[in-house]
Amino acid sequence: MLLGLSANSPYWRGDATGLASTRMPLFRAFPRVGIPPYYEDRQEYAASVPKIGILLAYFHLHPGAATNLDAQTRHELGLMVKASSNEMATRFSRELGLRQIQDVLNAYQFYDPKQGGGIWVGKHYGQGSERIGDPLDDHYHAATVRQLLRYFLRLEQGTLVSPAASRESSRPAAVLRPPPKTSPGNGTGSTRLSSSVTTWPTPKASTPTTACG
């Protein structure tokens, strides 16, 4: 009981402070400790983060892909969002179109100038002159914490496009493995699957040694 009372006490070193609690004023005295200050939504240049917008647009514009995605496309989408491949991001953004991608983000309200901006994809991740700056700060790749949290919350809830699309979008890093390749069979007309994934032998447990005196 004494610990509970003293943990948030109006007294400091035996003196009554006149405060209901001394904890908050004391925490404010430490520059690296305490509750962070409140910030309004602030849009920042986000580099590779908005690639998740390309992923959303792909499944939105190809609704059938959620349940019928071929291994090669799954692998390339995985490279884009999990390995941050600029090459794959540019391939998909050119295929879908920058304005179409942003239209999808706007439709899900992941960008709203009245809420401080949000996720913006206005440039391909490769060489090219096409550039569309966002209305607030003229960023071509931007994001806010609020909209990123909304994105991943909806992903977790299964409400991004559809439950199936949400599951595909959050598949584990195994999608980074190259899809199996077919190789010629043994002359019987059959083929076999080969994978380029390297496996390493499991190290043998070492046997402890005892020194003899």
Image (cartoon, helix red, strand yellow):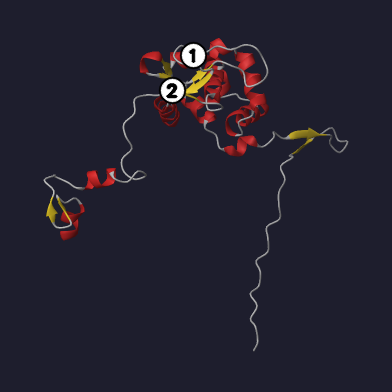
Q: Which residue is mark 2?
A: 43
Disc marking residue 134: 1
159 vs 26: above or below: above
Q: Quadrant of residue 86?
A: top right
Looking at the rendered structure, the kind of residue marked 1 is Asp
- Position of the N terminus, as image quadrant, is bottom left
State if disc 2 and disc 1 touch (CB < 8 Å): yes
Q: Quadrant of residue 41?
A: top left
Q: Is residue 50 left or right of residue 175?
A: left
Q: Is residue 36 left or right of residue 6?
A: right
14 vs 144: above or below: below
Disc marking residue 109: none
The answer to whether residue 1 is visible is no
Q: Which of the two discs, 1 and 2, labels the residue nearer the N terminus?
A: 2
Q: Is residue 24 left or right of residue 138?
A: left
Is label 2 in a helix, a strand or a loop?
Answer: loop
